[in-house]
């Protein structure tokens, strides 16, 4: 867990930074020429981006609701939840299609989701007790993954409607154990 904790504290992962560590990536096996051709239809790109951003706003609301359901004393987590839309890692400019949707939040969100911290660590995908006193009184509160999982099919449909050859890569969106 120490490695994960330190990577989250890195400069690039601060909320003002550019990197959002949990991403849904929209990619395809089409080349740069096909992407350029798609982007010539400015109205289609704008409609696609608007639908993706509406999806992100809907997921953001569902995540905030999940936080309030799982976490009794939400001091900072829901306020830190941010979303970002990018075109190949850069801020979207006019006429560029969204290629990734990112969600960022304070590191505490990871700890709460996994049920780790203050004497509870992850080792090889298993929670272990490292504190010397007391028993198991901290449990995982899966506020993130189930919400994202429930909303991915809708994003897939949005992407399919826009361009049937694009794929939704979810390998970087879920909080890993």
Image (tube, rainbow, N blue to C red):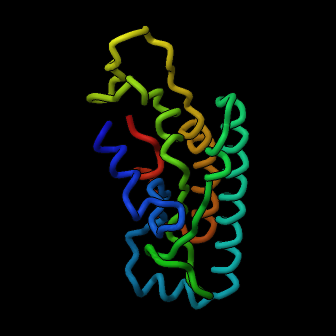
Q: Position of residue 130 (x, y in %)?
A: 32, 20
Residue 165 versus residue 113 in the image, above or below: below
Instruction: Name the foreground residue: 83 vs 162.
Output: 83
* Residue 69 found in image quarter: top right
Single out the residue that lies furthest toward the bottom. 40
Instruction: Name the foreground residue: 74 vs 57.
Output: 74
Tell me what residue is drawn at x 34 percent, y 52 percent.
7
Q: Position of residue 66 (x, y in %)?
A: 68, 37
* Residue 27 found in image quarter: bottom left
Give the left or right position of residue 91, taking residue 49 as reference: left
Q: Position of residue 104 (x, y in %)?
A: 54, 55
Tell me what residue is drawn at x 63 percent, y 66 percent.
161
Give the left or right position of residue 95, taking residue 24 as reference: right
Give the left or right position of residue 47, taking residue 33 as reference: right
Tell me what residue is drawn at x 38 percent, y 34 percent.
177
Residue 99 versus residue 171 in the image, above or below: below
Tell me what residue is drawn at x 67 percent, y 65 percent.
53
Give the left or right position of residue 88, taking residue 143 as reference: left
Q: Position of residue 3 (x, y in %)?
A: 28, 44
Instruction: Name the foreground residue: 148 vs 162.
Output: 148
Which of the image's four quarters has the N terminus?
top left
Q: How many marks?
A: 0
């Amino acid at each position: 867990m120490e490695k994960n904790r330190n990577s989250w504290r890195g400069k690039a992962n601060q909320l003002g930074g550019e990197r959002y560590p949990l991403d849904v990536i929209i990619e395809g096996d089409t080349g740069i020429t096909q992407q350029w051709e798609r982007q010539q239809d400015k109205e289609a790109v704008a409609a696609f981006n608007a639908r993706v951003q509406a999806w992100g706003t809907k997921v953001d609301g569902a995540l905030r609701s999940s936080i309030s359901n799982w976490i009794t004393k939400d001091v900072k987590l829901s306020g830190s939840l941010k979303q970002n839309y990018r075109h190949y890692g850069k801020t979207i400019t006019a006429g560029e299609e969204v290629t990734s949707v990112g969600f960022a939040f304070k590191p505490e969100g990871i700890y709460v989701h996994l049920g780790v911290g203050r004497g509870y660590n992850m080792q090889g995908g298993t929670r272990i007790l490292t504190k010397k006193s007391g028993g198991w009184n901290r449990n995982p509160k899966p506020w993130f993954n189930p919400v994202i999982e429930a909303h991915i099919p809708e994003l897939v449909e949005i992407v399919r409607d826009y361009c049937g050859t694009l794929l939704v890569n979810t390998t970087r969106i879920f909080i890993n154990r």
